[in-house]
Amino acid sequence: MPKTVTLSPSGQSVSVVDEDETVLQALEKAGYALPNNCRAGACGECKVRVLQGEVDQGFVMDMALPQADRVNGYRLMCVAKPLTDLVIEWSAPVDAPKLFPPREAMPYLVVDRIPRTPRIVELHLMPLGTPMRFWPGQYVAIKAPSRPDEPRHYSLARAPRPDGMIVLQITRVDGGVTSAWLHERVPIGATLPISGPYGTFIGNPKTDTPVLCLAAGSGQAPILSLADAALRRGYQSPVTLIFSARTADDVYGQGLLAYWTHKHRNFKSYVTLTREQRSGLLHGRVPDILPGLFPDLAGYSVFIAGSTAFSDACVAAVKRLGAKDAQLNLEKFVDVSGVYHQA
Ligand code: FES
Protein backbone atom coordinates (compact mmCIF):
# COMPACT_ATOMS: atom_id res chain seq x y z
CA MET A 1 0.00 0.00 0.00
CA PRO A 2 1.40 3.46 -0.89
CA LYS A 3 2.89 5.47 1.95
CA THR A 4 3.01 9.25 2.26
CA VAL A 5 6.15 11.05 3.35
CA THR A 6 5.43 14.56 4.60
CA LEU A 7 8.27 17.06 4.78
CA SER A 8 8.46 19.27 7.86
CA PRO A 9 8.14 22.19 8.21
CA SER A 10 7.15 22.90 4.58
CA GLY A 11 4.25 20.43 4.49
CA GLN A 12 5.30 19.22 1.02
CA SER A 13 4.62 15.50 0.56
CA VAL A 14 5.62 12.63 -1.71
CA SER A 15 4.22 9.14 -2.22
CA VAL A 16 6.18 5.93 -1.89
CA VAL A 17 4.36 3.53 -4.15
CA ASP A 18 6.67 0.56 -4.35
CA GLU A 19 7.59 -1.34 -1.16
CA ASP A 20 11.22 -1.57 -2.34
CA GLU A 21 11.44 2.17 -2.82
CA THR A 22 13.54 4.21 -0.42
CA VAL A 23 12.56 7.62 0.92
CA LEU A 24 15.43 9.13 -1.05
CA GLN A 25 14.17 7.59 -4.31
CA ALA A 26 10.68 8.91 -3.69
CA LEU A 27 12.03 12.40 -2.99
CA GLU A 28 14.15 12.32 -6.14
CA LYS A 29 11.22 11.19 -8.28
CA ALA A 30 9.38 14.25 -7.04
CA GLY A 31 12.41 16.44 -7.83
CA TYR A 32 13.51 17.17 -4.26
CA ALA A 33 17.28 17.38 -3.80
CA LEU A 34 17.96 15.71 -0.45
CA PRO A 35 21.77 15.69 -0.07
CA ASN A 36 23.20 12.22 -0.64
CA ASN A 37 26.43 10.64 -1.71
CA CYS A 38 27.07 6.89 -1.36
CA ARG A 39 23.41 5.78 -1.58
CA ALA A 40 24.45 2.74 0.44
CA GLY A 41 24.21 3.67 4.13
CA ALA A 42 27.91 4.42 4.40
CA CYS A 43 28.48 8.18 4.40
CA GLY A 44 25.72 9.73 6.53
CA GLU A 45 25.05 12.48 4.01
CA CYS A 46 21.31 11.69 3.79
CA LYS A 47 20.73 11.59 7.56
CA VAL A 48 17.34 13.04 8.52
CA ARG A 49 15.25 12.87 11.69
CA VAL A 50 12.00 10.91 11.39
CA LEU A 51 9.43 12.84 13.43
CA GLN A 52 6.53 10.40 12.97
CA GLY A 53 6.21 6.87 11.63
CA GLU A 54 8.48 3.87 11.18
CA VAL A 55 11.01 2.87 8.55
CA ASP A 56 12.86 -0.31 7.71
CA GLN A 57 16.39 1.07 8.01
CA GLY A 58 18.16 -1.95 6.53
CA PHE A 59 21.92 -2.32 6.94
CA VAL A 60 23.87 0.87 7.61
CA MET A 61 27.36 1.53 8.89
CA ASP A 62 27.81 2.76 12.46
CA MET A 63 30.04 5.62 11.35
CA ALA A 64 27.23 6.83 9.07
CA LEU A 65 24.53 6.53 11.73
CA PRO A 66 25.96 6.38 15.27
CA GLN A 67 23.83 4.93 18.07
CA ALA A 68 23.25 8.38 19.61
CA ASP A 69 21.67 9.55 16.35
CA ARG A 70 19.48 6.44 16.11
CA VAL A 71 18.18 7.06 19.62
CA ASN A 72 17.33 10.62 18.62
CA GLY A 73 15.26 9.41 15.68
CA TYR A 74 17.71 9.97 12.83
CA ARG A 75 17.65 7.58 9.89
CA LEU A 76 19.48 7.31 6.57
CA MET A 77 17.02 8.08 3.80
CA CYS A 78 19.04 6.39 1.03
CA VAL A 79 18.27 2.95 2.47
CA ALA A 80 15.18 3.70 4.61
CA LYS A 81 11.92 2.15 3.35
CA PRO A 82 8.71 3.44 4.95
CA LEU A 83 6.68 0.92 6.94
CA THR A 84 4.03 3.56 7.73
CA ASP A 85 3.25 7.11 6.63
CA LEU A 86 6.12 9.37 7.71
CA VAL A 87 6.86 12.91 8.73
CA ILE A 88 10.54 13.79 8.26
CA GLU A 89 12.45 16.84 9.45
CA TRP A 90 13.67 18.12 6.10
CA SER A 91 12.31 20.43 3.45
CA ALA A 92 13.72 21.37 0.08
CA PRO A 93 15.30 24.85 0.16
CA VAL A 94 12.97 27.27 -1.60
CA ASP A 95 15.53 28.41 -4.18
CA ALA A 96 17.05 24.95 -4.84
CA PRO A 97 16.74 23.70 -8.41
CA LYS A 98 14.32 20.79 -8.83
CA LEU A 99 15.94 17.49 -9.74
CA PHE A 100 15.02 15.53 -12.84
CA PRO A 101 13.45 12.18 -11.87
CA PRO A 102 16.06 9.40 -12.22
CA ARG A 103 15.40 6.58 -14.69
CA GLU A 104 16.68 3.01 -14.59
CA ALA A 105 18.86 1.23 -17.15
CA MET A 106 18.70 3.68 -20.06
CA PRO A 107 20.59 2.23 -23.05
CA TYR A 108 23.68 4.24 -23.98
CA LEU A 109 26.12 3.28 -26.74
CA VAL A 110 29.86 3.65 -26.21
CA VAL A 111 31.00 5.81 -29.15
CA ASP A 112 34.51 6.54 -27.94
CA ARG A 113 36.93 5.50 -25.22
CA ILE A 114 40.03 7.58 -24.54
CA PRO A 115 42.73 6.57 -22.04
CA ARG A 116 43.37 9.76 -20.09
CA THR A 117 45.95 8.50 -17.58
CA PRO A 118 47.27 5.02 -16.72
CA ARG A 119 44.28 4.70 -14.35
CA ILE A 120 41.52 6.79 -15.95
CA VAL A 121 39.64 5.98 -19.15
CA GLU A 122 37.09 8.40 -20.58
CA LEU A 123 33.92 6.96 -22.14
CA HIS A 124 31.72 8.92 -24.53
CA LEU A 125 28.19 7.56 -24.66
CA MET A 126 25.25 8.41 -26.91
CA PRO A 127 21.64 7.71 -25.84
CA LEU A 128 19.73 5.10 -27.85
CA GLY A 129 16.47 6.31 -26.34
CA THR A 130 15.33 9.61 -24.86
CA PRO A 131 18.39 11.47 -23.56
CA MET A 132 18.71 11.74 -19.81
CA ARG A 133 18.13 15.21 -18.38
CA PHE A 134 20.53 16.15 -15.61
CA TRP A 135 22.11 19.01 -13.73
CA PRO A 136 25.84 19.62 -14.16
CA GLY A 137 27.69 17.96 -11.27
CA GLN A 138 25.36 14.95 -10.98
CA TYR A 139 26.35 11.32 -11.44
CA VAL A 140 24.99 8.07 -12.87
CA ALA A 141 25.02 4.44 -11.74
CA ILE A 142 26.33 1.44 -13.69
CA LYS A 143 26.13 -2.23 -12.71
CA ALA A 144 28.67 -4.77 -13.94
CA PRO A 145 26.95 -7.98 -15.13
CA SER A 146 28.74 -9.95 -12.41
CA ARG A 147 27.60 -7.48 -9.70
CA PRO A 148 23.92 -6.78 -10.46
CA ASP A 149 23.24 -5.65 -6.89
CA GLU A 150 26.23 -3.35 -6.53
CA PRO A 151 25.85 -0.25 -8.67
CA ARG A 152 28.89 1.97 -8.93
CA HIS A 153 28.63 5.70 -9.38
CA TYR A 154 30.38 7.86 -11.96
CA SER A 155 30.13 11.61 -12.29
CA LEU A 156 29.03 13.15 -15.55
CA ALA A 157 32.04 15.07 -16.85
CA ARG A 158 30.35 17.57 -19.17
CA ALA A 159 27.35 19.86 -19.12
CA PRO A 160 24.20 18.52 -20.84
CA ARG A 161 24.42 18.68 -24.67
CA PRO A 162 21.64 18.95 -27.22
CA ASP A 163 22.51 15.54 -28.73
CA GLY A 164 22.42 13.87 -25.29
CA MET A 165 26.01 12.61 -25.34
CA ILE A 166 27.44 12.02 -21.87
CA VAL A 167 31.08 11.69 -20.81
CA LEU A 168 32.30 9.54 -17.92
CA GLN A 169 35.83 9.36 -16.51
CA ILE A 170 36.37 5.96 -14.93
CA THR A 171 39.15 5.49 -12.40
CA ARG A 172 40.49 1.98 -12.23
CA VAL A 173 40.33 1.13 -8.54
CA ASP A 174 42.43 -1.64 -6.99
CA GLY A 175 40.05 -4.57 -6.47
CA GLY A 176 37.18 -2.69 -8.16
CA VAL A 177 35.23 -5.20 -10.26
CA THR A 178 33.08 -2.65 -12.07
CA SER A 179 35.94 -0.31 -12.93
CA ALA A 180 38.03 -3.26 -14.19
CA TRP A 181 35.09 -4.39 -16.36
CA LEU A 182 34.63 -0.90 -17.80
CA HIS A 183 38.36 -0.60 -18.48
CA GLU A 184 38.88 -4.04 -20.01
CA ARG A 185 35.62 -5.48 -21.34
CA VAL A 186 33.44 -2.67 -22.64
CA PRO A 187 34.52 -1.79 -26.20
CA ILE A 188 33.37 0.94 -28.55
CA GLY A 189 29.97 -0.16 -29.86
CA ALA A 190 28.88 -1.80 -26.59
CA THR A 191 25.60 -0.78 -25.00
CA LEU A 192 25.65 0.17 -21.33
CA PRO A 193 22.57 0.44 -19.09
CA ILE A 194 22.84 3.80 -17.35
CA SER A 195 20.69 4.77 -14.36
CA GLY A 196 20.33 8.29 -13.04
CA PRO A 197 20.87 11.12 -12.71
CA TYR A 198 21.67 11.26 -9.00
CA GLY A 199 23.39 13.61 -6.59
CA THR A 200 23.06 17.14 -5.32
CA PHE A 201 26.52 18.51 -6.15
CA ILE A 202 24.85 20.99 -8.42
CA GLY A 203 25.40 24.34 -6.80
CA ASN A 204 22.86 27.07 -7.08
CA PRO A 205 22.31 28.53 -10.56
CA LYS A 206 21.66 31.90 -8.91
CA THR A 207 25.22 32.07 -7.52
CA ASP A 208 27.23 35.03 -8.81
CA THR A 209 30.22 35.00 -6.43
CA PRO A 210 33.81 34.17 -7.41
CA VAL A 211 34.16 30.39 -7.59
CA LEU A 212 37.06 28.18 -6.50
CA CYS A 213 37.02 24.52 -7.59
CA LEU A 214 39.35 21.95 -6.00
CA ALA A 215 39.60 18.49 -7.54
CA ALA A 216 41.75 15.37 -7.27
CA GLY A 217 41.79 12.35 -9.58
CA SER A 218 38.50 11.75 -11.37
CA GLY A 219 37.00 14.26 -8.93
CA GLN A 220 37.77 16.55 -11.82
CA ALA A 221 34.75 15.10 -13.70
CA PRO A 222 31.89 16.81 -11.80
CA ILE A 223 33.94 20.00 -11.58
CA LEU A 224 34.37 19.99 -15.38
CA SER A 225 30.63 19.53 -15.79
CA LEU A 226 29.82 22.46 -13.49
CA ALA A 227 32.46 24.74 -15.02
CA ASP A 228 31.43 23.78 -18.56
CA ALA A 229 27.83 24.75 -17.83
CA ALA A 230 28.71 27.97 -16.00
CA LEU A 231 31.10 29.21 -18.70
CA ARG A 232 28.68 28.33 -21.49
CA ARG A 233 25.91 30.31 -19.88
CA GLY A 234 28.22 33.34 -19.59
CA TYR A 235 29.14 33.27 -15.91
CA GLN A 236 30.86 36.61 -15.24
CA SER A 237 32.68 36.21 -11.90
CA PRO A 238 36.15 34.63 -11.68
CA VAL A 239 36.24 30.80 -11.81
CA THR A 240 39.47 29.06 -10.74
CA LEU A 241 40.14 25.32 -10.87
CA ILE A 242 43.00 23.70 -8.97
CA PHE A 243 43.62 20.09 -9.95
CA SER A 244 45.75 17.95 -7.64
CA ALA A 245 47.59 14.90 -8.98
CA ARG A 246 50.35 12.72 -7.63
CA THR A 247 52.56 12.84 -10.72
CA ALA A 248 52.52 14.38 -14.20
CA ASP A 249 51.28 11.02 -15.54
CA ASP A 250 48.08 11.47 -13.50
CA VAL A 251 47.25 14.87 -15.02
CA TYR A 252 44.53 14.94 -17.67
CA GLY A 253 42.02 17.26 -19.30
CA GLN A 254 44.55 20.04 -19.84
CA GLY A 255 43.53 20.67 -23.46
CA LEU A 256 39.99 21.55 -22.46
CA LEU A 257 41.21 23.74 -19.61
CA ALA A 258 43.61 25.56 -21.96
CA TYR A 259 40.70 26.18 -24.34
CA TRP A 260 38.53 27.61 -21.56
CA THR A 261 41.45 29.80 -20.40
CA HIS A 262 41.77 31.32 -23.89
CA LYS A 263 38.06 31.65 -24.50
CA HIS A 264 36.90 32.91 -21.09
CA ARG A 265 38.88 35.72 -19.47
CA ASN A 266 37.36 34.92 -16.06
CA PHE A 267 38.63 31.28 -16.07
CA LYS A 268 41.97 30.14 -14.73
CA SER A 269 43.38 26.73 -13.80
CA TYR A 270 46.38 25.35 -11.94
CA VAL A 271 47.82 21.87 -11.59
CA THR A 272 49.67 20.90 -8.45
CA LEU A 273 51.71 17.70 -8.13
CA THR A 274 52.13 16.12 -4.73
CA ARG A 275 54.84 13.56 -5.48
CA GLU A 276 57.10 15.20 -8.04
CA GLN A 277 58.15 18.61 -9.29
CA ARG A 278 57.77 19.77 -12.89
CA SER A 279 58.46 23.19 -14.31
CA GLY A 280 55.29 25.11 -15.05
CA LEU A 281 53.27 23.15 -12.47
CA LEU A 282 52.76 23.84 -8.78
CA HIS A 283 54.12 21.47 -6.18
CA GLY A 284 52.42 20.45 -2.91
CA ARG A 285 49.07 19.47 -1.44
CA VAL A 286 46.15 21.81 -2.07
CA PRO A 287 45.82 22.80 1.62
CA ASP A 288 49.50 23.80 1.62
CA ILE A 289 49.53 25.88 -1.57
CA LEU A 290 46.11 27.49 -1.11
CA PRO A 291 47.09 30.34 1.29
CA GLY A 292 49.64 31.60 -1.23
CA LEU A 293 47.05 31.69 -4.03
CA PHE A 294 43.89 32.66 -2.14
CA PRO A 295 44.69 34.34 1.18
CA ASP A 296 41.06 35.37 1.68
CA LEU A 297 38.18 33.12 0.57
CA ALA A 298 35.39 35.07 2.26
CA GLY A 299 32.77 35.64 -0.39
CA TYR A 300 33.87 32.69 -2.57
CA SER A 301 31.75 29.70 -3.46
CA VAL A 302 33.95 26.63 -3.13
CA PHE A 303 33.39 23.29 -4.89
CA ILE A 304 35.49 20.31 -3.76
CA ALA A 305 35.50 16.84 -5.36
CA GLY A 306 37.74 13.89 -4.61
CA SER A 307 38.42 11.23 -2.00
CA THR A 308 37.16 11.67 1.55
CA ALA A 309 40.68 12.46 2.78
CA PHE A 310 41.21 15.06 0.04
CA SER A 311 37.81 16.66 0.66
CA ASP A 312 38.23 16.80 4.43
CA ALA A 313 41.69 18.38 4.18
CA CYS A 314 40.46 20.95 1.64
CA VAL A 315 37.38 21.84 3.72
CA ALA A 316 39.57 22.54 6.75
CA ALA A 317 41.94 24.63 4.61
CA VAL A 318 39.27 26.78 2.92
CA LYS A 319 37.55 27.41 6.26
CA ARG A 320 40.85 28.64 7.71
CA LEU A 321 40.94 31.08 4.80
CA GLY A 322 37.48 32.46 5.54
CA ALA A 323 35.11 30.33 3.42
CA LYS A 324 31.71 29.88 5.07
CA ASP A 325 29.83 26.59 5.43
CA ALA A 326 26.99 27.88 3.28
CA GLN A 327 29.46 28.47 0.44
CA LEU A 328 30.88 24.94 0.47
CA ASN A 329 29.78 22.26 -1.99
CA LEU A 330 31.26 18.79 -1.60
CA GLU A 331 31.38 15.63 -3.68
CA LYS A 332 33.21 12.96 -1.69
CA PHE A 333 34.04 9.64 -3.28
CA VAL A 334 33.04 7.55 -0.31
CA ASP A 335 34.61 4.28 0.64
CA VAL A 336 31.96 1.51 0.67
CA SER A 337 33.08 -1.91 1.89
CA GLY A 338 36.69 -1.18 1.11
CA VAL A 339 36.26 0.33 -2.36
CA TYR A 340 35.40 3.85 -3.40
CA HIS A 341 31.81 4.27 -4.47
CA GLN A 342 33.11 5.12 -7.92
CA ALA A 343 34.90 1.75 -8.06
S1 FES B 1 24.42 7.15 3.83
FE1 FES B 1 22.83 7.79 2.55
S2 FES B 1 23.81 8.72 0.90
FE2 FES B 1 25.45 7.92 2.07
Image (cartoon, rainbow, N blue to C red):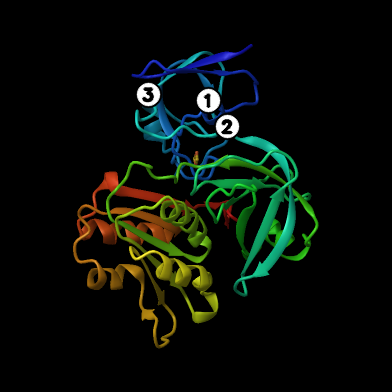
Residue 343 appears anywhere in the view = no
The answer to whether 287 is drawn above or below residue 331 in the figure is below
**Kind of residue sitting beneath label 3:** Glu
Q: How packed is label 3: few (under 14 Cα within 10 Å), some, or many (20 or more)?
A: some
Check disc 1: other Cα within 10 Å, few if <14, some if 14-19, many if 20+.
Answer: some
Q: Amino acid at mark 2?
A: Pro
Q: Secondary structure at mark 3?
A: loop
What residue does disc 2 label?
101
Residue beneath label 1, please?
Answer: 30
* Sequence-first tag of 3 and 2: 3
Q: If you read the primary sequence from the N terminus, does the residue marked by circle 1 or circle 3 appear first? A: 1
Q: Residue placed at 53% from the left, 26% from the top?
A: 23
Q: Secondary structure at mark 2?
A: loop
C-alpha separation, residue under disc 1 versus residue under disc 3 = 17 Å
The quadrant of the picture occupied by the C terminus is: bottom right
Residue at 37% over, 59% down: 213
Q: Where residue 230 sits: x, y (%)?
A: 41, 52
Which residue is painted at 53% across and 45% down in the image? 38
Residue 85 vs residue 244: left or right?
Answer: right
Image quarter of residue 180: bottom right
Left or right of residue 103, residue 271 in this image: left
**At which x and y percent is residue 164?**
64, 47
Instruction: Return the residue at label 3.
Output: 89
Dot 1 and dot 2 residues touching (CB under 8 Å): yes
Q: Nearer the viewer, mark 3 or mark 2?
A: 2
Q: Considering only order in the chain, which callout, 2 or 1, is on the residue closer to the N terminus? A: 1
**Looking at the picture, does residue 249 appear above or below residue 340?**
below
Report if the beta carbon of the residue with label 3 is closer than 8 angstroms to ligand 1.
no
Name the residue at the top extreme: 1
Say which amino acid is labelled 1. Answer: Ala
Quote the CA–CA distance across marks 1 and 2.
Answer: 7 Å
